[in-house]
Image: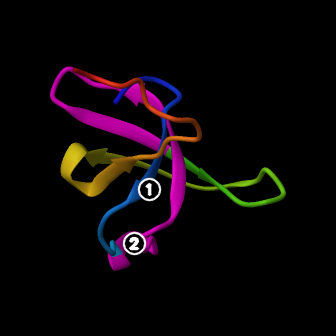
Amino acid sequence: MKLLDVVALTQDLPDLNLHKGQVGTVIEVYETGAFEVEFVDLKGKTYAVETLNALQLMQLYYAPLPQTT
């Protein structure tokens, strides 16, 4: 994952009031393999910014991926 990738949570994080499937944007990538993710509602208001690891996230794609051979 890289800066500005759109991601979804792969697990519930009830302590953070975040739940599997919620969508966010990567706003920082750390050398440790962690990602700062911003979660925004439909009105554009940020409701959470959290540091998460790759196992907690799934990258989303809005276009076909390039074919590999």
- Quadrant of residue 2 in the image? top left
Q: Residues within 10 Å of mark 2 (few under 14, many from 20)?
A: some
Q: Secondary structure at mark 2?
A: loop
Magenta residues?
Answer: 14-37
Q: Is residue 31 left or right of residue 5?
A: left
Comparing 51 with 12, the one in front is: 12
What count of labels does the image hold? 2
Question: Which residue is under mark 1?
Answer: 8
Give how far apart the Cα atoms at labels 1 and 2 are: 7 Å
| Whether label 1 touches label 2, CB < 8 Å | yes
Question: Which residue is under mark 2?
Answer: 20
Instruction: Give coordinates of residue 60: x percent, y percent.
Output: 47, 46
**Residue at position x 26%, y 56% in the image:** 56
Asked whether residue 16 is drawn in magenta, I would say: yes
Which of the numbered marks, if any, corresponds to residue 60? none
Type of residue at label 1? Answer: Ala
**Residue at position x 57%, y 36% in the image:** 63
